[in-house]
Amino acid sequence: MLPLRGQVWLKLQAARTIDAGDLSRLLGLASDEQIVQARQFMQASADKRDLHDFDSLVTLGRLEFGEQP
């Protein structure tokens, strides 16, 4: 079982649209603490483009589940 940050990393690296959909749902349901942990991991491990994609997917996921980002 992979922690959320690992799933985020692998799915962003795959760069498939199906993975982006999966990620937006995973991140939309994640707790604020999980989002912070995943974002810290992304800041340390990913490039600026991936970090921007991560932030966008968090926003889309939260909107999908009716929350304000």
Image (spheres, rainbow, N blue to C red):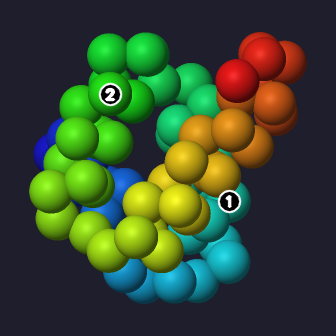
Residue 4 shows up from this direction? no
The picture quadrant where one finds residue 38 is top left
The image position of residue 42, as x and y in percent, is: 27, 55
Q: Secondary structure at mark 2?
A: helix
Proximity of marks 2 and 1: CB atoms separated by less than 8 Å = no
Q: Secondary structure at mark 1?
A: helix
Q: Residue at x 67, y 77 (%)?
A: 17
Q: Specify the farthest residue to the front.
A: 48
Q: Residue at x 39, y 30 (%)?
A: 35
Check the image and report above or below for 57 versus 39. Answer: below
The picture quadrant where one finds residue 11 is bottom left
Disc on res. 45: none
Q: Amino acid at mark 2?
A: Val
Between the C-alphas of marks 2 and 1, the distance is: 20 Å
Which-is-in-front pick, marks 2 and 1?
2
Quarter of the image for the N terminus: give it: top left
Residue 52 lies left or right of residue 35; in this view the side is right
Q: Is tag 2's residue or tag 1's residue first in the polypeptide sequence?
A: 1
Quarter of the image for the C terminus: give it: top right
Question: How crowded is the residue under tag 1: few (<14 C-alpha within 10 Å), some, or many (20+)?
Answer: some
Q: Nearer the viewer, residue 49 or 1?
A: 49
The picture quadrant where one finds residue 12 is bottom left
Give the labeled residue for mark 2: 36
Residue 62 shows up from this direction? yes
Q: Residue at x 15, y 56 (%)?
A: 44
Question: How crowded is the residue under tag 2: few (<14 C-alpha within 10 Å), some, or many (20+)?
Answer: few
Q: How many marks?
A: 2
The image position of residue 64, as x and y in percent, is: 82, 33
Q: Residue at x 26, y 69 (%)?
A: 46
Disc on res. 21: 1
Q: Amino acid at mark 1?
A: Gly
The image position of residue 2, as x and y in percent, is: 18, 48
